[in-house]
Image: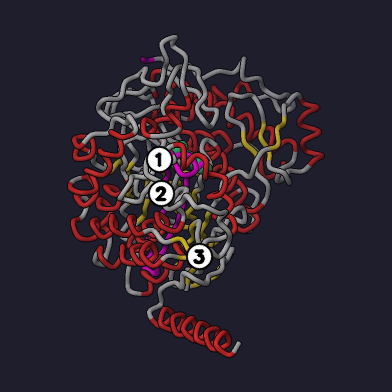
Amino acid sequence: MAQKFCLSIMFVFSSVILSLQLHAQSVPNPYHYVSHKKIDCKHGAVVSAHPLASQVGVSVLKKGGNAVDAAIATQLALAVVYPGAGNLGGGGFMVACLSGGKKIALDYREKAPAAASKDMYLDAKGDAQPNLSQNGHLASGVPGTVAGIFAALKYCRLPFKKLIQPAIDLAEKGFVITAAEARSLNETQEDFKKYNTVMPVFVKGSAWKAGDTLIQKDLAKTLKMIRDSGAKGFYEGETARLIVEEMQRGKGIITYEDLKNYAAKERDPVVVNYKSDYTIVTMPLPSSGGVLLPQMMRMIEDQPIKSYGFQSVQSVHLMTEIERLAYADRAKYLGDKDFFKVPTKTLISYPYLYHRMESYKPNVAGKSEIIGAGSIPESEETTHLNACDSDGNAVSITTTLNGEYGSRTVVAGAGFLLNNEMDDFSIKPGVANMYGAIGGDANAIAPGKRMLSSMSPTIVLKDGKPYLILGTPGGTTIITSVFQTLVNILEFKMTVQDAVFKPKFHHQWQPDVIYVEKDFPQNVRTQLQQMGYTIQQREPIGRTEVIKISEEGNIEAVGDKRGDDSAEGY
Ligand code: DON
């Protein structure tokens, strides 16, 4: 009894000492943390899907890092503490607006391996095999995340070692998992067993529960290799060997050359004005958000949406019809513009969009079988984070493995999950991917091509200064979530928290359905049904993170209530 008491006292004492030490270093305590849904602060903020990752980002700001440093450190920490979507084996996009006025769009989307081909997911009868594009070794594109991180370093202030060390510590020493993480690991156990030849740390003999410690030694080893050898620590040498051997064990096709040849790309961000006050800066193709968000904002710009009111039948009808028109264009015209000529300029031009809106009738539900893509004369797991600093830099990153835990295949010995991003290609014209999106030639598979994405990291400037930093996961719902959040704030003048927390809806042309969240008002559903719409209730839509910066420099950061998301700042 006395011994037990002594042991507990010692445990409490050592936990207190550890907490004090961690506090003194201003790094997160991985054994005790809480998520904050909203913070108000003055100097800088980070909002991401996990409290520990947001805390890592803020600790980097406090050490003198800028918003890009903080975003990179947060992204690396997410690869450890949020394995379902944070990643080394996936890809993503970064949009940033720097205090000197420079606007950046960094593309580190995965690419199809050199041995990929248009019909690689069709069987002998020509039928699509989505199981192969969604699970296991063949589902993976060549990962881009590590190349993206190194391409961003030129905008950072601190040495890379300081940005990656918190992730290494979290992987090596472990952290306690949340109830949501335990639930999702438990739900994925059978898939982990099915799609791995060597069992990863995520497979456990008994059920995971909140408070269990997750230690990832192999991942720590890979992170150290990246710390010591840079991008080559991932794309060449030991890690590349482990990836290629993993591929060979599971009939995957990623080779040493694919890895060595991968390069992130800086692109020109999409910059469009909204009314006279705001400038929207977002990701260009291969993000379809770079076309659809400007389309939707421009189609709504001169409509009296504000007078209709938030989630009134008229406003939901108007936004739904706009979404229908935009997503119909997505299916026909959008793909990697390095491989397919995309008429972006026309698609976002006012005359084209005015013409598209002619089909809109204020009191009648549209029909997707009638409303297709416009005619042009010529030819669910992802994660989002935002960071801002006291110098006026703003960063918005969305990164993904595609589905939750990606292909569910962990590179044995290297400890990270590979993406299942190949499913974002159109594996057969007209066949829906895991988000129900269809496509054709524009988004067909070709070696080295990037698959079309919906990820839309976005920054809105007011008088040239960052005003809103936002984005979300959610597959095809990403663009409509960003659209709704912008309309909520810019038109309905909602608080950021309301704009994020209120129920969302989504229409993507095909299927011809308005998806609504559980708490979407019943009376509006009924009236929309009476107009001829099909309404379908679904799981939560997105996990939207927003930072708003007032003219006076006051920062308001909000993490979505739909997950463990957390806003931190100082
Ligand atoms: O790039 C895309 O559009 C998808 N791979 C994103 C996946 C996603 O958001 C899943 N999250 N719930």
Task: Answer whether residue 391 is magenta in the image.
Answer: yes
Quickly name the residue at label 1: 196
Q: Identify the disc placed on residue 200.
A: 2
* Mark 1 vs mark 2, CA separation in Å: 8 Å
Q: Is residue 154 left or right of residue 52?
A: left
Residue type beneath disc 3: Val
User: What's the residue at 38%, 74% (across, down)?
Assistant: 62
Q: Secondary structure at mark 1?
A: loop
Q: Is residue 92 visible?
A: no
- Frontmost residue, 246 versus 263: 246
Q: Are marks 2 and 3 in contact (CB under 8 Å)?
A: no
Q: How many marks?
A: 3
Residue 153, compared with residue 452, is above or below; it is: below
User: What's the residue at 73%, 43% (across, down)?
Assistant: 520
Q: Secondary structure at mark 3?
A: strand
Residue 389, by quadrant, is bottom left
Residue 248, compared with residue 145, is above or below; it is: above
Q: Are marks 3 and 1 in contact (CB under 8 Å)?
A: no
The residue mark sitting in front, 2 or 3, is 2
Q: Secondary structure at mark 2?
A: loop
Q: Which residues are magenta?
A: 378-407
- Frontmost residue, 122 versus 15: 15
Q: Residues within 10 Å of mark 3 (few under 14, many from 20)?
A: many
Q: Are marks 1 and 2 in contact (CB under 8 Å)?
A: yes
- Report the colour scheme: secondary structure
Residue 3, by quadrant, is bottom right
